[in-house]
Image: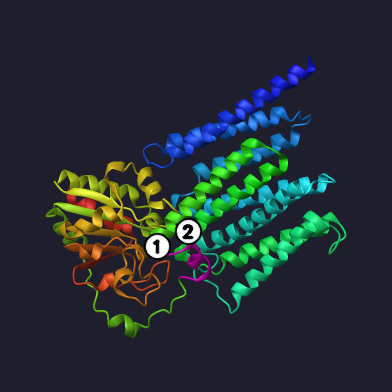
């Protein structure tokens, strides 16, 4: 009878894990489209909730006190993040959550290593990978958060021999891994010593991997760290022999790597180039060099209105400046007024616009902009010559003509939205300051470009008022 009960319990747990995994997979698939992303997020969350409940009931836990405390703290943080954190802070929040995932896996692996004696080599290898990847993810994510929140400068921190230092760190970590798995006792006397050494070295490696990366590469770094957090969770699943954690971690790890590859292709660069080139370490142009490019042509809101009012096709290119100004709602309102005036309005979204993958899609979805009018660069670049007005709202590097004209530019070869080919281009900026990559943009000096200076929300609101007058 007891045997049958155990079999039934195991069957129910495994079936529940299979259902959770299915919800993860279907939810992840739905996240690939803006129209189904919310449902996909709900499905994936439901799968995780089911997996947590089944795991807690399956482990015959006697005292749930600490678990309840942890659930309350975690739920409070999640609620605060979902309701209070501004959309402009989403990249920083994603970076922190990646770090939390890494440190959680590290703690799970560490606990298993310290509690259990006589683990086999396979289990010790899983623990080593969990601690290593989790530690790198945690410290690297903290650096990414610091760069995104501008507590740390966005420019890369480069020093001579950094690749050698990283290689030596990784080599020492591998030696420590051999010590943990096979040798045990060669360099350290206790479990605590080797574990602490691996943790410290993993934290340092995470810092050294991310600190040289420039701010313009943050979307790639965020995607990569997200993948690392999934791989750490997958390794932790092998440590505690939990199938659903293995599946969930593998899904996150694989999807993160795919997204990283997409981001790299969008910048026409390899992952190795992103990690080791220090992109963004450009020399700021002197005022004399800037002057050689030409004179900017400022534009007033009333003049911009007259041009827009006579336009039959308008392309809006949002960037991080729109996020900072929280202008997405008035941008949508302006788009609706232009459509009512007879213009065709579309929104061109570059894959690396903003500071995390999908940043602009999230903002426009929040403002209820129709998914049907969102287009990618390859959709609009072939017909850019027919566009009457391009409105660039806070974007910089993703519309920089140097990517196709200047072989000496750090972004040369990067696919961009070719707004410089439109009949007229409006650029909404606070000032002539360079973008997050620190690169001067010759678009501002083109003959068909007009600069509308000021806060993006105020500028667009002024245009809305002109249409309503």
Quarter of the image where the N terminus is located: top right
Residue projecting furthest to the left: 310
Expressed as whole percent of the image width and height from the top left, the position of residue 87 reads 44, 50
Q: Residue at x 61, y 26 (%)?
A: 15
Q: Which mark is residue 166?
A: none
Residue range in magenta is: 268-279
Sequence-wise, the earlier of marks 1 and 2 is 2
Would residue 90 be visible to someone looking at this image? no
* Pointer 1 local density, CA inside 10 Å: few below 14, some 14–19, many at least 20: many
Q: Secondary structure at mark 1?
A: loop
Q: Secondary structure at mark 2?
A: helix
Q: CA distance from mark 1 to mark 2?
A: 9 Å
Query: Is residue 168 depicted above or below 9 in this figure?
Result: below
Q: Residue at x 21, y 64 (%)?
A: 421
Q: Nearer the viewer, residue 126 or 64?
A: 126
Residue hosting label 2: 220
Q: Magenta includes 248?
A: no
Task: Tell me whether circle 1 and circle 2 mark residues in contact (CB < 8 Å).
Answer: yes
Expressed as whole percent of the image width and height from the top left, the position of residue 48 reads 58, 35
Q: Nearer the viewer, residue 89 or 2?
A: 2
Expressed as whole percent of the image width and height from the top left, the position of residue 49 reads 59, 32
Expressed as whole percent of the image width and height from the top left, the position of residue 320 reads 39, 58
Report the colour scheme. rainbow
Would residue 303 be visible to someone looking at this image? yes
Q: Quadrant of residue 208?
A: bottom right
Residue hosting label 1: 267
């Amino acid at each position: 009878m007891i045997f049958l009960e155990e079999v039934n319990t195991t069957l129910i747990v495994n079936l529940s894990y299979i259902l959770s995994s299915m919800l993860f997979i279907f939810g992840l698939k739905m996240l690939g489209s803006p129209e189904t992303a919310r449902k996909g997020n709900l499905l994936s969350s439901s799968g995780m909730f089911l997996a947590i409940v089944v795991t807690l009931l399956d482990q015959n836990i006697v005292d749930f006190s600490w678990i309840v405390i942890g659930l309350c703290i975690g739920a409070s943080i999640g609620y605060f993040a979902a309701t209070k954190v501004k959309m402009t802070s989403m990249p920083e929040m994603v970076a922190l959550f990646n770090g939390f995932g890494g440190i959680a896996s590290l703690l799970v692996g560490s606990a298993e290593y310290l509690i259990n004696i006589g683990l086999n080599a396979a289990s010790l290898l899983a623990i080593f990978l969990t601690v290593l990847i989790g530690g790198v993810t945690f410290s690297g994510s903290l650096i990414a958060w610091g760069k995104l929140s501008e507590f740390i400068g966005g420019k890369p921190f480069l020093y001579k021999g950094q690749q050698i230092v990283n290689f030596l760190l990784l080599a020492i970590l591998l030696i420590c891994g051999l010590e943990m798995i096979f040798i045990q006792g060669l360099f350290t006397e206790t479990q605590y010593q080797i574990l602490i050494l691996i943790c410290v070295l993993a934290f340092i490696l995470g810092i050294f991997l991310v600190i040289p990366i420039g701010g313009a590469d943050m979307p790639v770094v965020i995607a990569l760290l997200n993948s690392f957090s999934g791989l750490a969770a997958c390794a932790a699943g092998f440590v505690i022999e939990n199938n659903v954690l293995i599946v969930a971690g593998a899904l996150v790890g694989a999807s993160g790597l795919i997204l990283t590859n997409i981001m790299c292709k969008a910048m026409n660069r390899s992952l190795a180039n992103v990690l080791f080139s220090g992109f963004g370490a450009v020399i700021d142009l002197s005022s004399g060099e800037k002057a050689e490019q030409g004179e900017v042509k400022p534009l007033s809101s009333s003049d911009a209105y007259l041009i827009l009012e006579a336009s039959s096709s308008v392309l809006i290119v949002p960037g991080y400046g729109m996020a900072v100004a929280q202008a997405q709602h008035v941008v949508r309102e302006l788009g609706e007024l232009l459509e009512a005036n007879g213009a065709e309005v579309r929104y061109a979204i570059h894959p690396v616009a903003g500071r995390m993958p999908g940043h602009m899609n999230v903002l426009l979805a929040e403002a209820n902009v129709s998914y049907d009018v969102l287009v990618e660069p390859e959709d609009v670049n072939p017909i850019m010559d027919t566009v009457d007005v391009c409105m660039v709202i806070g974007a910089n590097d993703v519309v920089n003509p140097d990517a196709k004209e200047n072989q000496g530019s750090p972004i040369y070869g990067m696919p961009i939205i070719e707004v410089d080919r439109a009949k007229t281009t409006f650029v909404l900026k606070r000032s002539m300051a360079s973008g997050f990559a620190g690169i001067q943009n010759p678009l501002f000096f083109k003959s068909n470009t007009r600069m509308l200076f000021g806060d993006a929300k105020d500028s667009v609101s002024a245009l809305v008022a002109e249409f309503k007058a």
